[in-house]
Image (cartoon, rainbow, N blue to C red):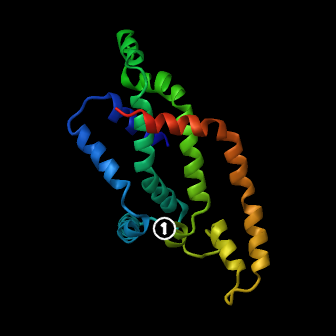
Amino acid sequence: MLVAAYAAYALSWMKFPFRNLLLAIVVGLLVVPLQMSLIPLLKMYNFIGQTFDVPAKTYVGIWLAHMGFGLPLAIYLLRNYIAGLPRELMESARVDGANDFTIFNKIILPLSYPALASFAIFQFLWTWNDLLVATVFLGNSEQTIVLTARLRELLGSRGGNWEILTASAFVSIIVPLVVFFALQRYLVRGLLAGSVKGG
């Protein structure tokens, strides 16, 4: 989310070559399905692991994968929100001698809490409920298995024990509910501001 916020600020208020092209690429990445990009991403991940002698099947890989899959939507939503902030705030900060880093940290970031919190809910739910990316990048070893893969194993090889699976799945929604109710006051405000205002 921090990387997306920096990128959104740069695409909104900083002048540099090919800014519009980069924004078009980000919007284009929104339509790329997750399943279509898994094989090239896994090949690149394995190549980097073999080249730099990094152990495979670690949490770093799945963190980077979720970061890559979540960045286009995060950048797009946050860019729309940040571009809708008043230009006078940035201009007055520049008159006072603030650079881009100071403007982002002192002005943009505090004003973007609703958009950041609303996207944090979605990103948390996507990663919490993920099974496909976790299985591809982590496998099914006991040291790195995630909750959704553990729930799948409860079903058994013949589809029995479904009552244990449903009870466990019901218990596993407690954490997402806590996150949602903690941040839900920002949800509607942040998403509406990010989708209605665009620069």
In front here: 65 or 175?
A: 175
In front here: 80 or 145?
A: 80
Instruction: Give how far across and how far down residue 196 sits, in percent.
Output: 44, 35
The residue at 74%/86% (across/down) is 160
Residue bearing mark 1: 55
Q: How many numbered circles does the render carry?
A: 1
Crowding at dot 1, Cα within 10 Å, few <14 / some 14-19 / many 20+, comes out as few
The residue at 50%/43% (across/down) is 1
The residue at 72%/59% (across/down) is 173
| Amino acid type, mark 1 | Pro
The image shows residue 78, relative to residue 103, as above or below, that is below
Locate residue 195 relative to residue 157 in the image: left or right.
left
Instruction: Give how far across and how far down residue 31 sits, in percent.
Output: 36, 58
Residue at the limit of the structure toward the top, as seen here: 96
Q: Which corner quadrant of the image does residue 74 belong to?
A: top left
The image shows residue 14, relative to residue 122, as above or below, that is above
The residue at 60%/47% (across/down) is 121
In front here: 199 or 120?
A: 199
In front here: 141 or 199?
A: 199
Quarter occupied by the C terminus: top left
Residue at the limit of the structure toward the left, as seen here: 17
Residue at the limit of the structure toward the bottom, as seen here: 158
In the structure shown, which secondary structural element does the residue marked by tag 1 occupy? loop
Instruction: Give how far across and how far down residue 195 sits, in percent.
Output: 45, 39
Instruction: Give how far across and how far down residue 180 sits, in percent.
Output: 67, 46
